[in-house]
Image (spheres, coloured by chain):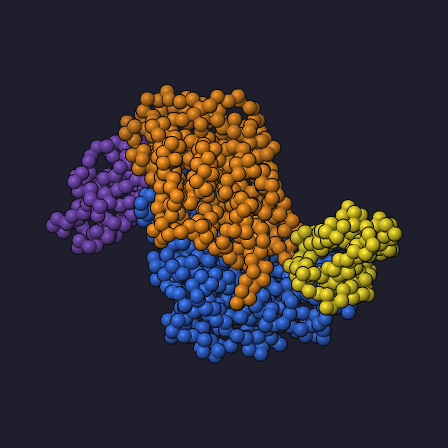
Chain colours: A orange, B blue, C purple, D yellow
Amino acid sequence: MLVKEVKYSPLNVELIRKDFPILQRLVNNYPLIYFDNGATTQKPLQVIEAITHYYTHTNSNIHRGVHTLSRESTEAFELARKTIAAHFNIKNDQQLIFTSGTTDSINIIANGLSRSILKDGDEIILSAYEHHSNILAWQLWAEQHNGKLKVIPLKEDHSLDYDALKNLVTAKTKVIAITHVSNTLGLVTDLEKVKKVAEKHNCILVVDGAQSAPHMKVDLEKLNVDFFVCSAHKIYGPTGTGILYMNKKWLNDLPITKPGGGTIKTVSFEKTEYAEGALRFEAGTPNIEAVIGFAAAINYINRFGMEAIHKHELDLVNYAQYKLSGIPEVIVYGQNPDKAAVISFNVKNAHPFDVGTLLDKYGIAVRTGHHCTQPLMSILCVPGTVRISFALYNTKQEIDFFIEKLKKVITMLM
Amino acid sequence: MLVKEVKYSPLNVELIRKDFPILQRLVNNYPLIYFDNGATTQKPLQVIEAITHYYTHTNSNIHRGVHTLSRESTEAFELARKTIAAHFNIKNDQQLIFTSGTTDSINIIANGLSRSILKDGDEIILSAYEHHSNILAWQLWAEQHNGKLKVIPLKEDHSLDYDALKNLVTAKTKVIAITHVSNTLGLVTDLEKVKKVAEKHNCILVVDGAQSAPHMKVDLEKLNVDFFVCSAHKIYGPTGTGILYMNKKWLNDLPITKPGGGTIKTVSFEKTEYAEGALRFEAGTPNIEAVIGFAAAINYINRFGMEAIHKHELDLVNYAQYKLSGIPEVIVYGQNPDKAAVISFNVKNAHPFDVGTLLDKYGIAVRTGHHCTQPLMSILCVPGTVRISFALYNTKQEIDFFIEKLKKVITMLM
Amino acid sequence: MSIKEIENEIIEEFEIFGEDWEGKYEHLIDLGKSLPLIKEESKTEDKLIQGCQSRVWLNSEKKDDKIFFSADSDAIITKGMVALMIRVLSGQPAKEIIDSKLEFINKIGLKEHLSPTRANGLVSMINRMKMDAIKLI
Amino acid sequence: MSIKEIENEIIEEFEIFGEDWEGKYEHLIDLGKSLPLIKEESKTEDKLIQGCQSRVWLNSEKKDDKIFFSADSDAIITKGMVALMIRVLSGQPAKEIIDSKLEFINKIGLKEHLSPTRANGLVSMINRMKMDAIKLI
Ligand SMILES: Cc1ncc(COP(=O)(O)O)c(C=O)c1O
Ligand SMILES: Cc1ncc(COP(=O)(O)O)c(C=O)c1O
C-alpha cells in the first residue's frame, strides 16, 4: 500500500501556511484542516493581491484599446499567457487558450471535433475513471451521431487495463479522451502507453489534466498530445478560468464553435474572417482578473517548484495511507503505487456522508459522494467514497489529527 | 441633439468616487478620466472586498459538499443568485443562469435553439447595431444550415427602422436577436415594438442587454422576453461571469449543449439524466468568486437605485452632447433622443485612433475603433469612431476637461 | 401530543447534552439505528427522495383524520434526523403538518442539516411530507 | 549615413522638446503630414499590414545592394512613426536592416507605440521590413 518511495524534499510548510489566510480560520471551533484540495485549492495572498492590484490600478478591457489602462491590462494578460505557457513548457504561447475551465475546454474540443473529424458511427475511447466533464460532451455527440463510447476497464488493483485498451481500438476510433490523474482514486494514467496506442491508430489524444497539473510537473512539449486541459482554481488560482492547450496542428484546424467579440479579423453580415492564434478561441471579454491571478498562482508555486510540491504531497499520501492501513474498518480504493495527492476510502458499514458530516464537526473538510465519477462508483459498487486530497500547505500533523478523529467517528458510527 | 429631458437626481458623486480606488490613479501625469465604461466599468471597494473576503474566509467548491466551507460557499453563491434575480425582477431564481458572460450566454442560446427549434433554411433577424457577439453565433448556425440572417436597417437619424422590421418577418423567421442598447451609438431599442412583431409571428426574442443592464432599470418579469443576457464586468462586477435569463418555458426545453459536472442527476456511460433548473446549464465549477462579487456590485448600485444612476448618466450625456455640438469639427452619430450613457463621434479628417491616442496623453481613456460592430461601421462609412461612455462616478467637470483637451487635440491634428 | 408538545419534548431531551455535540450526535445516531422506519419492499422508486448523496424513502398514509409517515435513509445521521421528523409529524392532522415550522431542529442545534444546500434529501423530505399531507386530506 | 547615425540625429532632433510631449507629438504629426509615402495605386492588398485600428502599407524594393522602403498609414500618428522608421531604414544594406534594434524609438519617448498590444500595425510593419529585407537579399 506504499506509494513510490520518494525522498522528503523539505518545503517550509510553516512559512507557506502563512501565505494562506483562510488556514487561520476556525471551523466548528477547531482549526480548519482542509483536505478537499481536489475540489478546489485555497489561494495564497499573492493571488488575492494580484486580483486586488488589478482592480485598484489597471482594470480595463483588453485588446484593441488605445488608452493606457487598456494597454497595461493587455500587457498583463499577455504576460500571464507567457508565464503560464512557460510553466507548462508550451513553446508557442498561442497554443495556450484561456477558457472558463476544464469543462469549458473539453466542450470546445468536443464541439470542434464534431464539426470536423468525427463522423456518424465513429468511436471514442474513455477510461472508467473519467470525471463527468470528460464523459458528457462526448456522450452528447455520440447520441446525436450514432457514435459509440468505449471504456478502458480497471484491473484488480483499480489501475487501468492498458492491454484491454489495445483491443478496444478499431478503425472507427477517432479520439481517446482520458484523465491524467483520477480525481477519485488519485491514480496516474500511464500516458506513454496510451500515446503509443493513439499514435499507432492515428487517434486524437485528449488529456484531462485537471488533477495532474496541480500536483506534478507537466511538460506539454514533451508530452506532445493533441489537447491538454486544466482549471486554474485547482492550482491555487481563481475560479472561472482554465486552459485549453492544443497541438500546433490544431490551431487553425479546429473549427470555431464558440465565436464572439475578439475571435475575428473582419465581420460582415455576409461573411466573417476569424483571427489567428489563441484569440480565435477566446470569445468575448476574457476573465482578465482570473488569468492574471492564475499567473500569480503559477509564479507562487514556481518559487518551490513542482518537484518539491510533488514530493511533499506524495510523502503525505504515503503517510496517510500507512496510517489508514492501521484502521481495520477502513477500505482504501486504488491501491496502486503510482499515485498523486488523492486518497479515496470508505468505512465499512458506514455511509461516506456520515463520515464526512462528523469529520466536519472537528473542522476537517473532506469531500464525500461520487466526485462526479458515477460510472466509477458503479464499478466499485459503492454509493460514494470519502476523499482526502492534499496541497502544498498540508502537514503530517493534520493527518495525525484526522486519523485520531476518524477513529473517534468510527466508534460513534458503529 | 438633446436627449430626453430628465431632472437631475443628485447622486453624491464625490462620495461615490471614493469607493473606486482606481479613480485616484494618475495616467500620463493627469488624473485618470475613465470614459471607457462601455467596454468595462471600474469596481468599487465593496466588490473587491467581497472577493477578498471570499478567498480569505469561505473559498470552497460548491454544491454536493458536506463540509462547512462548502456549505457556506454554496449559500453565498445561491444568495448571490437570489440577489441578482431580485434586481432584475426574476420571480423564479432558477431562470437565472450564470455563464461566463454575454458572449457565452448567446452561444448557449444559439446552440440550444439550433438543436431544437431551428431548421435548415430558417431565418433569423438581427439589427444593424449588433455587437459581433450577437452576430457570429447566429451566422455560424446559418452557414451550416443554409439559414438566413436578415438585418433591421437604420433610419436617417440612426435609429432602427421598425417598419422595415415588419417586412422582414416571414413564416421562416424563428428568432429575433436584438441588442437592447447599441454599444456604439447608445441608442435604445424600442423593445415593445419588437415584441409586438415577435409575438404576432411567434418568433423567439433574444435580447442582448450587455449595454442596458448597466444603465437602466431592467424588469425581466415585465419585459417578458424569451432570453435576456448581460455581463457582470460592465455592471461594476468582476470579469468572467454574466447571466442568461430564460423564460420559464425554456428551462426544461432548451437542449443542453454544454454539459459537465454539476449539470446532471445521474450518469452512466450509457445514459445521463440531467438536473432541473439553473444547474442544468451551469457546467463545471462556476466562477464562484465572480458571482459573489457580482452580487456585491448589484447591492452597491441598489444603494442608489437604477433610476438615480440612469438620470445622472443621461444628464452627463446631455451635457457632453451639448458641449460637443459646439465644436464644428465633431460629428456625433446616433442623434436620436432615446439614448443611454454612450456617445460615438468622429473628428472630421482625423482618424479616431489619433484622437484616442492624444486624449490618452491627457489621462482621458476613450475607446476608439469599430467597437465590435463592424457591420455598423460599414453602414456609417467610417473606419471607426471615438466612443465615450459614462458610469455613475463620472462628472461634468470631467466632461469639461475632456472638451477642453479635445479642442486642443483637434488643433494638433489639423 | 401535539406537534408543539413533541417538539418541546425533543428540545428537552437534547438540552441535557448542552455544548457536547458529540453526545448529541451519538444520540442522533442511536435514534437512527433504533428502528427500521420503512419496510424494505416499500422502498420503491416513487417513495425515493434523491438527495445529492444520501437518499430518503418516505411512505405516507391516512388513517382516520391523521397522516402517518414511515421513512428511511441510507445514511445514519440523515436517518436520525428522519426519525425525529417522523416522531414530530406522524399521526398528526394534515393541517397541523402543513403549518408546522419544525423549529426544534434549529433549537437543538442541528439547523445546518436543513440547509437547502446540504447534500442530503431532508429539505425535500419535509416538502414531500407536506405535499403528501395536502394530497391526502 | 548609417542606421546608427540617423537614429542619433533623430534623438537629437527630439531632445529639444524635453518633457514637452505636446511639442513632440506635433513634430511627429508634421512628419506624418509632410509626405505621401507611397503612391495611391501601390496601396494594394499585398502591401497592407492590418493593425487592429490603423492600417499601414509598405512597399520594399532593392536598388544596388540596398533596400528602399516607402509606406503610408491612414492614421497620422502612425504615419509619423512610419516616416521615422523609413528615414532610418530605407536605403540601408539588407543586413543592417535585419540587425537593427531601432532603439531610438525608446530614447525619444515613443516606446509605447511599439507595444505589440498597440492597436496599430507598427510592430508588424517592422517585422515585414525585416522579412522583406531577407527575401530581397
Ligand atoms: C452590446 C454588447 N453585446 C455583447 C457584448 C459582449 O460582452 P462580453 O465581452 O462581456 O461577452 C458587449 C460588450 O462589449 C456589448 O456591448
Ligand atoms: C479530473 C477532472 N476533470 C474535470 C474536472 C472539472 O473541472 P472544472 O469543474 O473546473 O471545469 C475536474 C474537477 O472537478 C476533475 O477533477
Q: Nearer the viewer, residue B343 or A401?
A: B343
Residue furthest front in the image: D64
Residue furthest left in the image: C64
Q: Nearer the viewer, residue B209 or D108?
A: D108
Does A113 appear above or below B67? below
Relative image position of residue D126 (x, y in whole percent): 73, 53
Is residue C19 visible in this depiction of the protein?
no
Does C46 appear above or below A127? below
**Is C44 left, or right, of A399 in this rendering?**
left
Residue drawn at point x = 29 percent, y = 38 percent:
C78
Residue drawn at point x = 76 percent, y = 67 percent:
D39
Image-quadrant location for residue A377: top left
Q: Nearer the viewer, residue B122 or A101?
A: B122
Does A335 appear above or below B126? above
Relative image position of residue B193 (x, y in whole percent): 45, 75
Does B212 appear above or below A219? below
> How many numbered tags mark residues here?
0
Image-quadrant location for residue B269: top left
Is residue A293 visible in this depiction of the protein?
yes
> On the rendered image, what quadrant is the C terminus of chain C found in?
bottom left
> On the rendered image, what quadrant is the N terminus of chain C found in?
top left
Residue drawn at point x = 82 percent, y = 65 percent:
D34
**Is A319 left, or right, of B52 in this rendering?**
left
Residue drawn at point x = 37 percent, y = 64 percent:
B117
Relative image position of residue D38 (x, y in whole percent): 76, 64
**Is B343 left, or right, of B267 in this rendering?**
right
Q: Nearer the viewer, residue A250 or B159?
A: A250
**Is A294 left, or right, of A112 in this rendering?**
right
Relative image position of residue A314 (x, y in whole percent): 48, 26
